[in-house]
Amino acid sequence: MLNRREFHSSLLAAGVARGAGRPLRIATFRVDATPPLGTPLCFAMVPDGKEVVDRLSARGVILAGEDAPVVLAVLDWLGIGNEGHDEWRAALAKAAGTSPGRVAVHCLHQHDAPGYDPTGQRVLRDYRIPVPLYDENWMREVLGRASEATRQATRRLEPVTEIGLGKAIVERVASNRRLLGPDGKVQHSRLSSCKIEAVRALPEGAIDPAVRLISFWSGARPLASLTWYATHPQSFYAQGGISSDFPGLARAFRELALPETAHLHFNGAAGNVAAGKYNDGSPENRPVLAWRLAMGMKQAWDRQTRHPVSAADLRWRNVPVALPLRRGFDESALSKELVKPERTRAEHSRYGRAIAWARRVAAGHRIELTALQLGPARVLHLPGELFIEYQLAAQQLKPDEFQAMAAYGDYGPSYIGTEISYGQGGYETSVVSFVGPAVEQVLTDALRKLVA
């Protein structure tokens, strides 16, 4: 253990050795984001919350380099979409003294958790559909608390001497949801849980099996651990039990192991990835999946390599994109479906949010894709329920680079498939994707710019 004098000497020596100027600085924040009982969950697509199984959180990290600060935030919520995503980025930016373009906000996408989409809620009001998607007063309260926590965090920024980079394989958690038949169409949809043994026995399919980790160090003291892993986070759900599910439990295991370190976990491009091969939906399987993910996180931590870092090593890149509207998803067509009297609450929710996205596209809205560069590491921030192929393709653009991807940023477009997937059938691209096949070319071009 270094004493105070040795610690400050090590900081100075590290800076001189690199010819560095100012050090990179970091602060973290965390607030409770657990909704009150009776709150709509999953945008009112599952039963409302009737008990709290475990607390939800909103967590973030502020990184101060040579330019304006960068904020990364992640919530144990289903998603934050459209103007809601704009609100969160703007509020955290104001609190951190930066611009919204330097803020990335993501969700872990647990289904027994709330979502926030004021654009979708306004659509339902416009059409006089009495379906609340969330608790509005409580949502404002959480955003206010997160903003204040961000503001307070800027007052306790600490110098970072090194970052740690780690990677490990997570065994028997993720599997592809879309299993194709001989005709090239989706033959089996192996979702978050699957009770058909023959379908569970089929190969994992396209996934990214690795959990990636970036840690931040001040001398010998670890300040924060950020991890990324791509899978739908459901073990079982839709029973009214508010929960961060197995990724939240895995994160809690790591908090027990490293209690003085801030832990943030992000979901990757998991639109077509879930635990169905390894999960029959029994409640007993939640801690099993959590432990497997936690073991991957631990191995990534144990295997990490440390790299000196300074303020000059932080770079940020923005690439705005206009995602194409799915054919037939204009407001005129969708509104006819929305107002049919036989619609369920869940269908009202889906059509209302689809119209919200259609309005955004019609108004010329662009979503900002962003990339954080930290010395030898890069983190990409993307919207929606992105297919895993995008994450794998981004890695191939720079195969020798340490790269992580967080999806589930702006939830407005919902599922984002690949061009070929829209002709293959399946739930993801036949029912709940609000964008069209041309999205692949748009995102592929943008990824090339992000990793250039």
Image (tube, grey):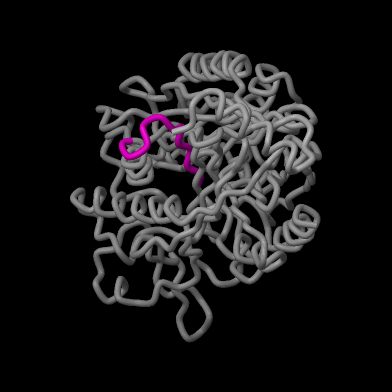
Residue 162 falls within the magenta-colored stretch: no
Determine whether, in the image, residue 174 is placed left or right of residue 149.
left
Q: Nearer the viewer, residue 99 or 23?
A: 23
Residue displayed at 40% across by 72% down:
204
Quarter of the image for the N terminus: give it. Answer: top left
Q: Residue at x 78, y 43 (%)?
A: 317
Q: Residue at x 39, y 41 (%)?
A: 111
- Image quarter where the C terminus lies is bottom right
Please, is residue 194 above or below residue 55 in the view?
A: below
Q: Is residue 316 left or right of residue 48?
A: right
Give percent across and percent down for residue 217. Answer: 55, 37
Instruction: Look at the image and tell me whether residue 193 can be seen.
Output: yes
Write down the quadrant of residue 117 in the picture.
top right
Closest to the observer: 307 or 122?
A: 307
Give the image location of residue 402, x and y in percent. Answer: 62, 57
- Looking at the image, which is closer to me, 55 or 404? 404
Drawn side of residue 265 relative to residue 193, left or right: right
Q: Is residue 263 magenta?
A: yes
User: Is any part of residue 348 visible from this angle?
Assistant: no
Find the residue positioned furthest to the bottom. 182
Residue that appears at 42% across and 37% down: 42
Could you tell me residue 216's position as x and y percent? 56, 38
Residue 67: image x %, image y %? 80, 30
Magenta segment range? 256-267
